[in-house]
């Protein structure tokens, strides 16, 4: 019995101890909004910006440190998808106003450090150009 409890406790700590926090810095952003017709507008011209974005897997959330902090609680992780050109990670979230939001991180396989994150809900999409700053384990 004690052995079973010890194994359960070890599994609990291993699961939370292995969670990671990924840190990113934005360098630019662009926006597209949904028109009344249901179509999306063209992306705006990329504007420079410097924000920090954290993906905290132990707390299941993204935090975008903008003027107004944006919090996205992850309720579903989609399996990583790879093509010849890029790797995509998708997260299904709820933002701090209760809106369903899909966050997608796209990393090209061409060796460049250029990554992008897309934050999309039914009304608008924001695309940030990212620089990966590292992770905490």
Image: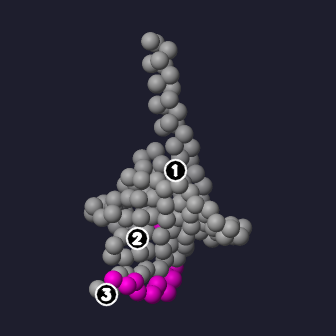
| Residue position marked by numbered label 3 in the rendering | 37
Q: Is residue 23 left or right of residue 64?
A: right
Give the residue displayed 34% in from the left and 59% down from the top.
94
Position of residue 19 measured from the top left corner of the image (x, y, whole percent): 51, 43
The x, y position of residue 119, in whole percent, is 43, 69
In this rendering, the count of numbered labels is 3
What is the distance, in whole Å, between disc 1 and disc 2 at their CAs? 22 Å
The extreme top residue here reads 1
The range drawn in magenta is: 37-51
Question: How far apart are the alpha carbons under marks 3 and 1?
Answer: 39 Å
Q: How is the image coloured?
A: one colour
Q: Quadrant of residue 80?
A: bottom right
Observer-side mark, 1 or 2, equals 2
Q: Quadrant of the N terminus?
A: top left
**Residue drawn at point x = 46 percent, y = 25 percent:** 9
Q: Secondary structure at mark 3?
A: loop
The residue indicated by pointer 2 is 120
Task: Please give the label number shown on residue 21.
Answer: 1
- Magenta span main SS: loop
Q: Nearer the viewer, residue 128 or 15?
A: 15
Locate residue 117 relative to residue 67 in the image: left or right. right
Query: Where is 116 relative to 93, above or below?
Result: below
Front one among 98 and 55? 98
Q: First in sequence: mark 3 or mark 2?
A: 3
Q: Which quadrant holds the C terminus?
A: top right
Between marks 3 and 2 in the image, the one whose residue lies nearer the viewer:
3
């Amino acid at each position: 019995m004690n052995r079973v409890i010890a194994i359960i406790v070890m599994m609990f700590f291993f699961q939370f101890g292995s969670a990671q926090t990924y840190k990113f810095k934005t360098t630019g952003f662009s926006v597209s909004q949904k028109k009344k017709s249901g179509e999306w507008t063209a992306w705006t011209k990329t504007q420079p910006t410097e924000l920090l974005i954290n993906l905290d897997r132990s707390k299941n959330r993204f935090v975008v440190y903008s003027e107004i902090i944006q919090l996205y609680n992850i309720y579903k992780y989609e399996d990583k998808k790879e093509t010849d050109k890029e790797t995509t990670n998708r997260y299904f979230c709820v933002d701090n106003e209760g809106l369903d939001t899909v966050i997608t991180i796209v990393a090209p396989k061409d060796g460049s450090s250029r990554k992008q994150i897309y934050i999309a809900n039914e009304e608008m999409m924001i695309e940030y150009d990212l620089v990966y700053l590292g992770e905490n384990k």
